[in-house]
Every structure is written in structure tokens, then in C-alpha cells.
Image (spheres, rainbow, N blue to C red):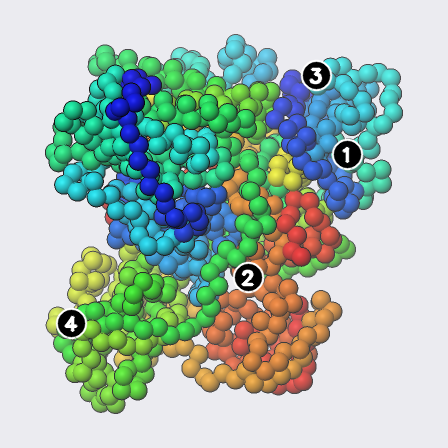
């Protein structure tokens, strides 16, 4: 069975759990005491990931690190509809890739702010908060126009992609890093839509949405 | 800016000075209509006040102070279930329209106190904008330039600058009337209609286009710019127009923000509440206990054989008070007779009250008057709802047994259970199809409503037995109907092992005449305080006046919330909550209503 | 042993220290506060933090001695070696329950005791120390609250439709708040429990900013697990909360215990950060208590009676 080296409160680990839950993939969690144990820094963990970070996914001996790479792998391998990672549609694939890169930015700002505030990680809080606001402004505008033209997801497709997964927790948990979402109504709407996806799961800090239209 | 600067002869600005200067009495846009899709909960802010905005399934837009009455959690984090808003922390529910608290899950059998209401703000939707204000006067601006056009709401833009400095820039917003061309000068006519509202018409040669821009004052440091423009019906280039203005306005925003040179960092959730002291003041509408109101009979129709339905609408702009499922109202008829009728409304349905009145064979003039004399358009007086038949919402199965017109309170309950998707069934016993009241409500319940027609007494009882089955924990029965049926159902349930607490009958209000005439002393054992309770005041009031926190709910001696231990002295109970043996023991009393028979009573407080 | 290779960051905390009005509340100044779990500190290295708006340095020397000092007296930047020689102006320190505790006062009120921790077969760990943007009293009150279990800890500490909070007892004994007879049906009360059980709790508030919970962990009915929330107030509206866990569970690993408790902790955090105002209002009319809130009502009144003004909005 797939093993995920995981820390419950990590946004990056959550991205992997979320996609596996949505794709209905069975997996097993290997808890890593990331905080306060710092076990990912241990020599023991170095054998699993020489870069000493989580998540790491082990699929029957094939080991892959980094959340966004894991998303690519999982979607390609386990989504037979090829919608989450649209490898058969070059334009859409390109778009997905560019938003995945954008998500690196939100992780390095919004989620870094969260690490600083929650766990005392040494980041310049003001700088990462400001960085997150810059990205969110852009992202909110993008999502507003997506909505206005009938789109629901980050990329120009009917179906969500792994870019949606990669961005989702960075946005929803931003407030834990002191980044208010009050100015980003389109992001809040999109996040709510994400919560209504079949197979959606929560993590600490993320609550479910109210029931959908189906009564 | 991309547009060329207007030259002197083609730029003219007209400014209409306005008298309204008090921000409290203005209408402001607080959201766009499409910010409120199905069951969304919107977090907004106006003049430093955080608000939650949510649209109920009936289309009504609610704007409330964004703070749960219980422990202050932001209601914008809560769940919009279409008729009620549920707080995320302890699940308190608040009704559409009134903001009244309808359910406290920690105490499923208690009715929340009537005065527990979120503070609400007015909401009007027009031109695709949701308008509100602290206590606005008149109506929101009517944008007549949109007549004959389709209104298009521009993307709203938050700007880190106060409304004043935003306004200065908005009045100079420049655009081309074709709504897509850069680079050509256009003549602008700007009309300042309100403090925070500009109407701008751009003209080039024969083509003109008008838009309205608004500044929503968020707080001292931020403003949201909103706008609406008219486009011809069926316009093909809506997106182009929206993008065109979004680009121009983003640039304008950059200018505004740079201009304001905001030093403090961008909006931060850690910013302290501007004045924590004032934020805690009076978060509940303290509108008080049962009172009376006048309503208009808006509709009277035959809903079943010998049963008329009445729809009662408030007069003027009044809001009908919150009710709980199972509640009834007193109806004061013009002929001097008072009758109680249960509300059949669904949750959050507070634009009207709906009751069903059966023509009683031996009517002393109540139902007869309603059937024969009362006409649509009449004004009658009613009491505010009394909630003495509260519905638990923590059952794993709820069985509702209705006989004839007794269905009415159970209809209200069924609609709540249906909306909340809880497991329940409504068994409605009637002579025939045409005796079923409110068939439209029954239909909305789908398969959970089971109709039983023309059964004999034995058959009815057999059916009741079958429907109830054995009792499992967390199952509850609510029954309402003719006396003999009630009695029989209760026996059957007991026989099947349903415990007393799981069987609920409507006990109409505490119908005893309560007296507040005595005066006596209370000694508070733990606080080492002795207080005097004069005639006309309750123990509860005296405790609160002296700063002692005491939970309470119905305040009519029915729910038991305000119970205290009595250490010495003899209570004068007057409540309907304690049973006879408890009353005899005299070691507990309800502070909302019980008094003392002795001169002094010692309480464990 | 494993310790943080990273000094506790003071970035983001210092602002508060500079901008705040400082703490003048004698009751609060006279208490002990936890700064860190000792095992998480790297010996010989200095750490920095903020306590009651005062910048504080702390650490464990290479000889295993705990020290803490005011940074405005002795400047040793975070991450630097601790000096071998002694310096003056040190703050009082003590080791208790695995944490380094300090006080800004020269004569602090004695730290409460947890007799259970003396039992030899018990295991005590720091679940985690987490920054939360709220006041210490709001966090304590949340810890005392059972009514939120089915909504905030759905599927773990409670589940709808079982939402009723049954009556329990609260009293003040020897200057502490004790709530007993608390019961709540729980789908999964501890990492080792399977299936729903009605869990019994005892709560104890022995310190204005610390609270303890005793409950059966399911291994030995007569031996209760102790869960503590020990708060380091950074300012009136920011805290670092340490969750202490002491149990007789000899099966679950530290990692598993941590994961479980941290999961719960993280569900409360967004609630706490969305309470308005952040300081706990002590006026009886500011918020709406119900019967289930007996312990919270007692806590608020107790703070009033103690004369606490820091982290609260006084009633007056
Ligand atoms: S704070 Fe909203 S229900 Fe308790
Ligand atoms: Fe909790």
C-alpha cells in the first residue's frame, strides 16, 4: 500500500491526503513528528528524504518527495479520467503547471507566515504576509473573472486540476498566518466550492462547508 | 493612466453638493448580489463594523453584526443552511430575517430566550448591489441612467486608503464611452450624488456611456470601490467591458494607495478590535419578553374541510418576531375572544405567520368568528410567539404523530427536521384526503410524511404502535391531536418502553396566573449577600441588577434554565417545570418566576 | 533526545513588545510561566522570546542549568552560545512538568502541583507549543468547554446529534476551580480508544493562565490521564500555548499521542482566532452564558475576584 510520511498540520502533507481521498486511493500514514520533535531533521529520516522534508510518498518502493511533485504523480497514475492532471490537453497542462508554480509562491509566503506565527519558524513575518497579499490580489482577480465567465476552478477547464489542490490550503489557512481573507471574496467562494468536492476531507483549521444544493 | 489627459474644453465636471453628511444615516453598498450564491456566508465590513451577510433560500438577504451572541465567534465562519445560520463553535442557530436564536444544541429541550437576537442591519438589493447602513434613512440611490439597460456590476476593489481620499480620485475616473478603447480623450461629466457616490458620463462624439462608482467605507484605513455600468441588453462584450474597467480601476487603485502612503502593513487579522470595550456592549437586541403586535390578514383560504388557513403579515416595516418550531400565538379577535393557534411556518420563514383554524362544532365564537366574519385585509392583534413545545434536534429518530388539526405544530417541526436532514417521520391521521390541512407543506416533506386515512380507533392505535416500535436511546416522540388519541399514544409508547422524557405533548404555556406581588429577601449563601426582592421584580432581575450572572431562557417558568438550589426558606414555585414531588421538597426554584412564601429564602449562589 | 535545531524565533513577537502598554497587573506578573519544553532546547544556546511584552532570553547551559534573563539587561542574540560565567539580573527559573518556567517577579506565587506526575510509570510529554492570536483567558475558557465537542471536534471528541451538555459541579476549592461530574459521549476520546464511549472529565484551573483536564485514557480506569494547557502570554492578545500530556498509555508512541492531541489543538485554534474581542469580557452582560457554561461563568467570576485585568475586559 502507498505510504505517506505525514505531519497532520502540514499544508503540503494535507494536499497529498486530499487528492488521495478525492481519487479514492488507499494509503497508510507514517506519522512524522515534525513539530516539536523535528524528526524530519533526523539522520533516520535522511534515509527517506536526503533533503529532510515532508511529505514523502512511497508507492510500493517508488519514493517521491515534495507535495506538488507527489500531486503530479498521483494524478497521473491514479486518475484514469486524466482530468486532475490533464496530460492529453497541452494548453490546459501548461496552464496547470503555471498555477502549480504560482502555488509555490503562496506556500512560500502565506504558509510560511503560518509557520512563523504558529510554530515560531524564523521568517520575516511582515515580508511574507505582504508577499501573500500581493499574490492573493492577483489570484482573487483571476478567480473573479473565471467566475464571471462561468468557470469554477483555477484553470480554464470544467473540472478542477491539481492546481486547485495545491492552492487550496495555502489560501484557507492563510488567516492563521495573520493574513485576512476579507478582501478576497472570489477566493472565499472558490474555497467553499473546493469543500463541496466529493471526497473532500478536512484538516485542523479547515472546517467543512454547508450542504450543497442537493437537498 | 492609459487615457490621454482630458483637455480643458472637453472635460467638465459638475458637482452636486449634498446635505447628507452623517455617515450613520447613509446607505452604502456592502456587497454585490453575486457575492451571495447559494448558501454562502459573506464576511464584510462597513464603517469599522464587521458584518456577516447571507442569503436564505427564500431570497432574503440578512446582514448582522458578525459576532455570535454566545461566545463572540465570527458568524461569517458559520454555516448557512438556507433558513438558519449556524455558529461554528457550539452550533447555536439564528433565524433568517430576525436573527433570533432558535436552537441551543447544548440544551436541546430548552427554548432560547426570546430576547436572544443578533443585531441586524437593513438590507436592500437593487442594481445588483446589496445596500446597507448603520441606520440609513430613505432608500438607496436610484440609478435611473440604468433604465433600459442591463446593469453590469464591476469587480469590487479593496483599496488601502480611507474613503475620503478614495473619493477624490473616483471623481476623476476617466474612461472611453465604448468601454474598450485606450488612448482617446473623452469628455466627462461627473455628478456627485452622495458623499460616496459618483455618476460619471463619458462622451466622445455621439457615443456616451454612464457609470456609477461608490466608495464603501470599510474602516479608517480601507475602502472598497464598487461600480455599476449599463450595457445594452444581450450585449456580447460583457467580459470585455468588465476587464476594461477592472484594468483602469486597478491602476487607479495603485495611484490611490501610493497617494495615501499607507505605512502600516496590509490588513492583518491580528489588528486589535478598534475598541474592545464598545465591541462587547449590548450585542443582543434587548427587545424584551412577550408583547403584542398588530398584523394584517393577508390571505384566508380553505386548506382542508372545515379548516381555513390564515396568513398574517406585519404592518408597515415591522419584523415579525422569531418563533421556534412548535410555537403558538394568542390571537385576539375583534369580538373579544382570545384563542391559541400553532404556527405552521418552516424555519426562517418570518415574512408572515401562517396558522390553521378548524371550525369547532361547539364554538363559543372563536373559530366561528374566524371562519365566518374575519376577512382578508382585517387587522387583528396577536401575541408574540410562545415557545412551549420545543423540538429537540439531537434525536437519532423523531416520530411525529398528528391527529386532525393537531398537525399544525408538528408541521413546523417537520419542516425543521426536513431542512436539517434529520431522521424523522410524520404520521398524519385524518378521516380522508380532504381533511389534510396544508397539503402543500406535506408534499414538501416527501416520503417522510405518512398519511393515514379513515382508520378506526383500533386501527389507529395499531398503526401508532407499529410506527413507534421499540425505543432506542436518543429517539423522541411528539404527539398532538384530540385528547383520547393523545392519551392512547402516550400509553402505547410507555408500553413499548419509551421513557417519559422521550414523549412530548404540547403543554400550552404556563397558564397559571403568576403573581409578582410578594416582597421578600434573598440570602446568597456563597456570595454572602442579602438582597431585597420587591413586588413587581423577579429574583432573576435582582440577581442581574447586582451583577450576578444567571443563565435564563424562557423566563416563564417553563424551561428550567434559571434553576437554583434552595438552602433554607420556602419557595413559592409558580412554575410548570418542576414536578410535584420536586415542588414539595422545596430545595430548588426557578429564579425567573418563583418567589418566597417565607420572609427570607437562602439560595446556593 | 531531540531538540529544536532552530532557536525560537522572536521575529513578529517583538512588535507586540514594543507597541503594547506593558503589563501592570500584579496578579499576572506574580505568576510562573512556561517558556519551552526543556528537551526541546539545545544546551549551550540562547533563545529569545517575549513574556508579558518583555523581551526575555533563556536557555539551558552546557551544565544543564536553566537560565532566563531580561534582554534589556543582558543582550545575547538568539542562537549564540550561552556564556559560561554567571551574570546578574537573571530571572527566577524552575523546571516543572518538563518545562522551563520563569517569572518576571522576584517573589512569584508558588507554582501549582500535579501530584500524578510523580507516579513512576507515567509518561509525560510536551505535545507542542503553538502560537495563537488570542488572549490567555479565551484559550483557558475554550479548554474548559465541552459544548463545542460535536461541532469543532466532530468525529473525535463528539458527534452530532449528541450535543447535550449534562449538568456538572463546579466549585472553588483551595483557590482553584474544580469542575467534576462532567460527561460527554465521544466517538474517539483517546488515540487508543475504539468506538464511542461516554467519557468522564475533571477540570482544574489552578493558575489564571493554566488549566488541567483529567480523563480516563482507557488503559487503567483508576488512573487518569492528565492534559494541561500552560500558557505563555506574549501580550494581551497573543499567546504561546504549550499542551502537556501525561498518561499511563504504554502502547501509543509519542508521535501517535502527539498527532492525536495536536489534531484536536489545531481545530480549536481557528475558533479562538475568530472570537471577538480577543480579550475575555468579564461583564456578565457582554456575552450570553447558558447552563453548560457553568465552568466558564465561574472562571470569569474568579478572574474578576482575583482582580485580573490583563487579557480581559474588566467588568466595572
Ligand atoms: S460562540 Fe457561537 S455558539 Fe457558542
Ligand atoms: Fe476544543
- The Cα atoms of the two marked residues, 3 and 1, are separated by 20 Å
In the rendered image, which residue does mark 1 sit on? C102
Badge 2 density bin: few <14, some 14–19, many ≥20, Cα 10 Å: many
- The Cα atoms of the two marked residues, 2 and 4, are separated by 44 Å
Q: Quadrant of residue B532?
A: bottom right
Tell me the tag on residue B301: 4
- The Cα atoms of the two marked residues, 1 and 4, are separated by 76 Å
Find residue A205 and report its horizontal and vertical position in percent.
47, 36
**In the drawing, does residue B582 fall left or right of residue B388?**
right
Q: Quadrant of residue B455?
A: bottom left
Q: Secondary structure at mark 3?
A: loop
Badge 3 density bin: few <14, some 14–19, many ≥20, Cα 10 Å: some
* Residue at the (55%, 64%) spot, across then down: B551
- The Cα atoms of the two marked residues, 3 and 2, are separated by 50 Å
Find residue A147 and report its horizontal and vertical position in percent.
26, 31
* Cβ–Cβ under 8 Å for marks 3 and 2: no
Q: Is mark 1 within 8 Å of ligand 2?
A: no
Q: Quadrant of the C terminus of chain B?
A: bottom right
Image vertical order of residue A120 relative to residue A61, above or below: below
In the rendered image, which residue does mark 3 sit on? C79
Asked if residue B32 shows in the view, the reply is yes
In front of the other: label 1 or label 4?
4
On whether disc 4 and disc 3 are found on a single subunit, the reply is no
Q: Quadrant of the N terminus of chain B?
A: top left
On whether disc 3 and disc 2 are found on a single subunit, the reply is yes
* Residue at the (50%, 78%) spot, across then down: B575
- The Cα atoms of the two marked residues, 4 and 3, are separated by 81 Å
In the rendered image, which residue does mark 2 sit on? C291
Find residue C21 and report its horizontal and vertical position in percent.
69, 38
Find residue B3 and report its horizontal and vertical position in percent.
29, 19
Amino acid at each position: 500500500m502507498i505510504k505517506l510520511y505525514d505531519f497532520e498540520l502540514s499544508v503540503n502533507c494535507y494536499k497529498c491526503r486530499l487528492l488521495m481521498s478525492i481519487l479514492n486511493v488507499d494509503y497508510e500514514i507514517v506519522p512524522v513528528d515534525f513539530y516539536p520533535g523535528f524528526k524530519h531533521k533526523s539522520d533516520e529520516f535522511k534515509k527517506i528524504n536526503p533533503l529532510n522534508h515532508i511529505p514523502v510518498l512511497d508507492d510500493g518502493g517508488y519514493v517521491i518527495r515534495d507535495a506538488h511533485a507527489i500531486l503530479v504523480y498521483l494524478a497521473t497514475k491514479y486518475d484514469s479520467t486524466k482530468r486532475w492532471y490533464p496530460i492529453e490537453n497541452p494548453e490546459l497542462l501548461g496552464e496547470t503547471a503555471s498555477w502549480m508554480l504560482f502555488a509555490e509562491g503562496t506556500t512560500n509566503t502565506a504558509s510560511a507566515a503560518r509557520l512563523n506565527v504558529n510554530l515560531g519558524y524564523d521568517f520575516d513575518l511582515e515580508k511574507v504576509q505582504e508577499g501573500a497579499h500581493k499574490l492573493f490580489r492577483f489570484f482573487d482577480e483571476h478567480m473573479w473573472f473565471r467566475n464571471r465567465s462561468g468557470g469554477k476552478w483555477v484553470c480554464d477547464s470544467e473540472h478542477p486540476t491539481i492546481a486547485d489542490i495545491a492552492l487550496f490550503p495555502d489560501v484557507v489557512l492563510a488567516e492563521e498566518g495573520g493574513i485576512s481573507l476579507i478582501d478576497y471574496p472570489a477566493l472565499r467562494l472558490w474555497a467553499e466550492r473546493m469543500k463541496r468536492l466529493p471526497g473532500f476531507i478536512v484538516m485542523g483549521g479547515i472546517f467543512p462547508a454547508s450542504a450543497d444544493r442537493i437537498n | 493612466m492609459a487615457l490621454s489627459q482630458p483637455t480643458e474644453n472637453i472635460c467638465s465636471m459638475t458637482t452636486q453638493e449634498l446635505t447628507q453628511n452623517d455617515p450613520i444615516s447613509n446607505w452604502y453598498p456592502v456587497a454585490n448580489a453575486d457575492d451571495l450564491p447559494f448558501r454562502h456566508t459573506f464576511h464584510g465590513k462597513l464603517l469599522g463594523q464587521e458584518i456577516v451577510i447571507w442569503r436564505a433560500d427564500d431570497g432574503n438577504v440578512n446582514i448582522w453584526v458578525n459576532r455570535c451572541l454566545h461566545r463572540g465567534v465570527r458568524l461569517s465562519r458559520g454555516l448557512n443552511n438556507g433558513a438558519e445560520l449556524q455558529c461554528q463553535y457550539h452550533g447555536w442557530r439564528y433565524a433568517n430575517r430576525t436573527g433570533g436564536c432558535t436552537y441551543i444544541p447544548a440544551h436541546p429541550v430548552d427554548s432560547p430566550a426570546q430576547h436572544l437576537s443578533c443585531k441586524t442591519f437593513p438590507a436592500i438589493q437593487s442594481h445588483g448591489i446589496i445596500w446597507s447602513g448603520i441606520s440609513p434613512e430613505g432608500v438607496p440611490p436610484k440609478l435611473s441612467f440604468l433604465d433600459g439597460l442591463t446593469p453590469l456590476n464591476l469587480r469590487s476593489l479593496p483599496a488601502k486608503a480611507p474613503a475620503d481620499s478614495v473619493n477624490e480620485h473616483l471623481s476623476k475616473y476617466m474612461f472611453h464611452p465604448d468601454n474598450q478603447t485606450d488612448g482617446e480623450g473623452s469628455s466627462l461629466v461627473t455628478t456627485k450624488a452622495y458623499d460616496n457616490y459618483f455618476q460619471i458620463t463619458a462622451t466622445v462624439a455621439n457615443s456616451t456611456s454612464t457609470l456609477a462608482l461608490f466608495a464603501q467605507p470599510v474602516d479608517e484605513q480601507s475602502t472598497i470601490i464598487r461600480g455599476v455600468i449599463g450595457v445594452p441588453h444581450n450585449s456580447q462584450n460583457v467580459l470585455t467591458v468588465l476587464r476594461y474597467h477592472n484594468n483602469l480601476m486597478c491602476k487607479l487603485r495603485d495611484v490611490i494607495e501610493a497617494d495615501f502612503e499607507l505605512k502600516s502593513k496590509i490588513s492583518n487579522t491580528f489588528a486589535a478590535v478598534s475598541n474592545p470595550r464598545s465591541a462587547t456592549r449590548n450585542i443582543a437586541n434587548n427587545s424584551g419578553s412577550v408583547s403584542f403586535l398588530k398584523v394584517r390578514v393577508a390571505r384566508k383560504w380553505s386548506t382542508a374541510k372545515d379548516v381555513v388557513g390564515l396568513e398574517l403579515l406585519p404592518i408597515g416595516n415591522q419584523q415579525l418576531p422569531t418563533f421556534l418550531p412548535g410555537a403558538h400565538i394568542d390571537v385576539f379577535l375583534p369580538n373579544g375572544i382570545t384563542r391559541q393557534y400553532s404556527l405552521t411556518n418552516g424555519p426562517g420563514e418570518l415574512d408572515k405567520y401562517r396558522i390553521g383554524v378548524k371550525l369547532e362544532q361547539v364554538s363559543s365564537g372563536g373559530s366561528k368568528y374566524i371562519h365566518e366574519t374575519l376577512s382578508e385585509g382585517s387587522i387583528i392583534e396577536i401575541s408574540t410567539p410562545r415557545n412551549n413545545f420545543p423540538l429537540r434536534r439531537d434525536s437519532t429518530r423523531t416520530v411525529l404523530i398528528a391527529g386532525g388539526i393537531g398537525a399544525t405544530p408538528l408541521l413546523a417541526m417537520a419542516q425543521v427536521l426536513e431542512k436539517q436532514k434529520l431522521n424523522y417521520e410524520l404520521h398524519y391521521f385524518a378521516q380522508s384526503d380532504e381533511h389534510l390541512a396544508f397539503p402543500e407543506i406535506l408534499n414538501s416533506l416527501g416520503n417522510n410524511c405518512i398519511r393515514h386515512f379513515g382508520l378506526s380507533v383500533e386501527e389507529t392505535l395499531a398503526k401508532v404502535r407499529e410506527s413507534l416500535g421499540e425505543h432506542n436511546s436518543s429517539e423522541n416522540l411528539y404527539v398532538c391531536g384530540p385528547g383520547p388519541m393523545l392519551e392512547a399514544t402516550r400509553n402505547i409508547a410507555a408500553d413499548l418502553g419509551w421513557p417519559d422524557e422521550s414523549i412530548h405533548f404540547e403543554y400550552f404555556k404556563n397558564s397559571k396566573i403568576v403573581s409578582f406581588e410578594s416582597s421578600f429577601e434573598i440570602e446568597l449563601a456563597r456570595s454572602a449577600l442579602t438582597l431585597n426582592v420587591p413586588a413587581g421584580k423577579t429574583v432573576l432581575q435582582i440577581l442581574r441588577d447586582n451583577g450576578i450572572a444567571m443563565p435564563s431562557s424562557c423566563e416563564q417558568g417553563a424551561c428550567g434554565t434559571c434553576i437554583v438550589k434552595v438552602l433554607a426558606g420556602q419557595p413559592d414555585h409558580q412554575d410548570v417545570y418542576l414536578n410535584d414531588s420536586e415542588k414539595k421538597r422545596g430545595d430548588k426554584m426557578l429564579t425567573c418566576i418563583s418567589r418566597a412564601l417565607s420572609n427570607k429564602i437562602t439560595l446556593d449562589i | 533526545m531531540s531538540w529544536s535545531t532552530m532557536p525560537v524565533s522572536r521575529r513578529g513577537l517583538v512588535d507586540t513588545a514594543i507597541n503594547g502598554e506593558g503589563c501592570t497587573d500584579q496578579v499576572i506578573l506574580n505568576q510562573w510561566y512556561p517558556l519551552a519544553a526543556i528537551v526541546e532546547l539545545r544546551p549551550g544556546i540562547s533563545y529569545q522570546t517575549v513574556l508579558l511584552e518583555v523581551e526575555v532570553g533563556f536557555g539551558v547551559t552546557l551544565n544543564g542549568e536553566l537560565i532566563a534573563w531580561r534582554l534589556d539587561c543582558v543582550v545575547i542574540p538568539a542562537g549564540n552560545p550561552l556564556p559560561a560565567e554567571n551574570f546578574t539580573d537573571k530571572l527566577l527559573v524552575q523546571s516543572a512538568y518538563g518545562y522551563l518556567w520563569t517569572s518576571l517577579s522576584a517573589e512569584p506565587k508558588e507554582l501549582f502541583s500535579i501530584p500524578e506526575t510523580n507516579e513512576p510509570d507515567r509518561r509525560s510529554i510536551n505535545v507542542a507549543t503553538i502560537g495563537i492570536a488570542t488572549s490567555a483567558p479565551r484559550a483557558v475558557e475554550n479548554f474548559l468547554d465541552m459544548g463545542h465537542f460535536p461541532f469543532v471536534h466532530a468525529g473525535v471528541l463528539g458527534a452530532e446529534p449528541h450535543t447535550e451538555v449534562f449538568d456538572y459541579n463546579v466549585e472553588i476549592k483551595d483557590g482553584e476551580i474544580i469542575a467534576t461530574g462532567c460527561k460527554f459521549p465521544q466517538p474517539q476520546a483517546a488515540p487508543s480508544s475504539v468506538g464511542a464511549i461516554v467519557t468522564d472529565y475533571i477540570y482544574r484551573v489552578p493558575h489564571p493562565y493554566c488549566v488541567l483536564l483529567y480523563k480516563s485514557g482507557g488503559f487503567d480506569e483508576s488512573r487518569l490521564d492528565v492534559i494541561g494547557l500552560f500558557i505563555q502570554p506574549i501580550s494581551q492578545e497573543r499567546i504561546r500555548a504549550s499542551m502537556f500530556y501525561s498518561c499511563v498509555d504504554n502502547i501509543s508512541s509519542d508521535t501517535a499521542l502527539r498527532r492525536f492531541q495536536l489534531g484536536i489543538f489545531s481545530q480549536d485554534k481557528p475558533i479562538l482566532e475568530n472570537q471577538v474581542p480577543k480579550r475575555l469580557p468579564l461583564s456578565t452582560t457582554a456575552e450570553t452564558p447558558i447552563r453548560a457554561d457553568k465552568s466558564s461563568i465561574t472562571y470569569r467570576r474568579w478572574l474578576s475576584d482575583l482582580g485580573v485585568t490583563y487579557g480581559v475586559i474588566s467588568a466595572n
